[in-house]
């Protein structure tokens, strides 16, 4: 289903019993993050939180904060408009595996899939709820002259005359050593200046002052690639940032889509309704008309980079200060009843674990098209996304596990994976204990390990050089004669199924 706004999404969570409302004031400086962290580490991810009275520098904001809305399997499935992640994955799998029909029934099924695709293409509209309140910022007369002070405002009733700046929004300072407040769920829209191809990515943004932020697009990201073209030509780069709207939009901004595939296409397919796009006020980029907030601006390619950070990151450690481009605001537009969406990252498990795992489940059918031997794949929470990957395969020939390792290291963000463990098809890769048992039992480290090197996550503090690091692959599958194992491979201990059933019937779950 499609959600028309963050408030609509919150209402659905409330009806499903997935929301806790916090009615007393909570400071956006550290306190809100601590509250969210406790909830995220509750059993099964806890509940989504709606902070109705977030305070900014001691003053209550007119905009509530929604956090941990993706932080459980149920909420993640709801955000994708599905009863379960498996249902969404099966739907996408059927779509990508579609073949010419061999019967009338298959033709009807194929037509049904095509009918669903009618929603994928975004639609252009003239205006939308994201423009209910508009504030443009005039640039200063010169580069050296300071911005004029922003007008004061106190309540939602005054938003028309005094709409907010970045310093007024309930943007979180998440951890004690953070360099400032950070937008943590911003969907950043950029465009390739040569091809016109659009990208929507999610890159944290540190607030420097009321009208400038950092733009933390790492060097391997598409937004950074677009930026490099503007830097090469010395021209100003238009950027648009939106927050909120249908949760499928935020998920699509984080999804590992093939290069060049529009994230709004994925969002439209997931929500079974086209994403309405509206042109920005101060540049030609398009943003979802139903977004809660839109922050328009630019990156000046002639401006020096500025230090960004520290930031308490998904690695569980602080990302230390590094130079990044500066984003300048030219306008803020928003709904009158806007809800500010946020998340925090840190030592797992956190909300982002469910978002990453959902991407794996959803795109596994696509991955299997390239690697048909893959049975399942998991990114354990302890690996903070791509640091650790477990893969199960249906092995039919020698060295097949290493073939899969090399292939996956060449697939998108899998290039950042530091440790990859390949196991047999009968292993549940989502059971870390079972994988570790097979790893310890089935490997000779010298024979079954491969050490290589390649691109690394910019946020990985353990690498000797930024963005360059080593990778270790371990083949924990049963060994074949062609793999240097010349002895018989022993069978694993298992009780006969008939005995298991008989004992279960007689004694139930008793130990």
Image: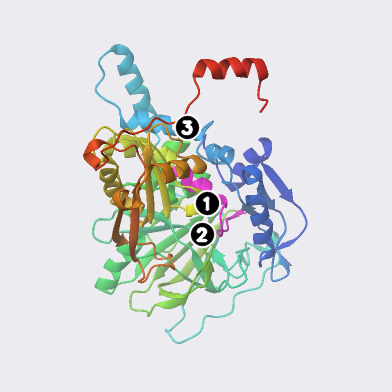
Instruction: Report the disc number at residue 352.
Output: 1
Q: Residue at x 37, y 71 (%)?
A: 464
Q: Nearer the viewer, residue 205 or 366?
A: 366
Residue 167 position, x and y percent, is 60, 70
Quarter occupied by residue 390:
top left
Q: Is residue 418 left or right of residue 127?
A: left
Name the residue located 69 percent from the left edge and 63 percent from the top edge.
31
Q: Earlier in the sequence, mark 2 or mark 3?
A: 3
Q: Tell me the residue at 29%/68% (across/down).
A: 228
- Label drawn at residue 314: 2
| 123 horizontally vs 450: left or right | right
CB under 8 Å between callouts 1 and 2? Answer: yes
Q: Which residue is mark 3?
A: 86
From the viewer's perspective, is residue 86 above or below residue 170? above
The crowd level at tag 2 (other Cα within 10 Å; few <14, some 14-19, many 20+) is many
The region drawn magenta spans 336-359
Q: Earlier in the sequence, mark 1 or mark 2?
A: 2
For marks 1 and 2, give the CA distance: 8 Å
Question: How many numbered marks, from 0 up?
Answer: 3
Q: Is residue 276 above or below residue 235?
A: above
Callout 3 environment at 10 Å: few (<14), some (14 to 19), or many (20+)? some
| Residue sitting at the far top | 104
């Amino acid at each position: 289903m499609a959600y028309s706004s963050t408030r609509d999404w919150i209402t659905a969570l409330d009806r499903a019993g997935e929301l806790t409302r916090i009615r007393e004031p909570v400071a956006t400086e550290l306190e809100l993050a601590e509250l969210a962290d406790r909830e995220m580490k509750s059993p099964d991810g806890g509940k989504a939180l709606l902070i109705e009275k977030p305070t900014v520098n001691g003053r209550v904001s007119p905009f509530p904060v929604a956090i941990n809305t993706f932080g459980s399997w149920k909420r993640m499935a709801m955000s994708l408009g599905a009863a379960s992640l498996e249902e969404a994955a099966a739907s996408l799998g059927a779509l990508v595996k579609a073949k010419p029909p061999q019967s009338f029934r298959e033709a009807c099924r194929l037509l049904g899939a095509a009918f669903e695709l009618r929603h994928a293409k975004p639609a252009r509209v003239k205006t939308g709820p994201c423009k209910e309140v508009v504030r443009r910022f005039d640039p200063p007369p010169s580069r050296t002259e300071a911005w004029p002070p922003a007008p004061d405002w106190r309540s939602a009733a005054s938003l028309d005359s005094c709409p907010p700046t970045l310093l007024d929004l309930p943007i979180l300072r998440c951890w004690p050593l953070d360099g400032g407040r950070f937008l943590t769920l911003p969907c950043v829209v950029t465009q390739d200046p040569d091809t016109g191809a659009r990208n929507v990515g999610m890159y944290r943004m540190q607030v420097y002052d009321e009208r400038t932020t950092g733009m933390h697009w790492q060097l391997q990201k598409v937004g950074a690639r677009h930026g490099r073209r503007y830097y090469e030509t010395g021209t100003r780069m238009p950027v648009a940032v939106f927050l909120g709207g249908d949760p499928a939009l935020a998920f699509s901004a984080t999804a590992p889509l093939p290069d060049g595939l529009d994230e709004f296409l994925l969002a439209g397919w997931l929500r079974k309704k086209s994403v309405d796009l509206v042109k920005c006020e101060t540049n030609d980029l398009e943003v979802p008309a139903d977004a809660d907030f839109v922050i328009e601006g630019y990156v000046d390619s002639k401006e020096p980079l500025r230090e960004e950070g520290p930031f308490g990151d998904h690695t569980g450690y602080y990302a230390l200060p590094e130079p990044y481009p500066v984003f300048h605001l030219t306008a803020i537009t928003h709904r009158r009843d806007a809800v500010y969406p946020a998340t925090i990252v840190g030592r797992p498990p956190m909300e982002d674990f469910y978002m990453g795992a959902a991407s794996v489940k959803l795109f596994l059918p696509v991955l299997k098209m390239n690697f048909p031997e893959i049975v399942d794949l998991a990114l354990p929470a302890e690996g903070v996304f791509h640091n650790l990957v477990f893969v199960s395969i249906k092995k039919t020939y020698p060295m097949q596990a290493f073939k899969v390792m090399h292939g996956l290291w060449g697939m998108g963000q899998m290039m950042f994976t530091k440790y990859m463990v390949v196991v047999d098809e009968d292993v549940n890769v989502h059971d870390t204990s079972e994988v570790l048992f097979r790893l310890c039992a089935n490997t000779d480290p010298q024979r079954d390990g491969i050490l290589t090197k390649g691109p690394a996550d910019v946020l990985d503090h353990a690498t000797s050089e930024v963005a360059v690091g080593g990778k270790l692959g371990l083949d924990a599958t049963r060994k074949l004669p062609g793999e240097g194992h010349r002895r018989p491979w022993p069978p694993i201990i298992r009780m006969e199924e008939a005995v298991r059933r008989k004992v279960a019937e007689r004694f139930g779950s008793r130990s």
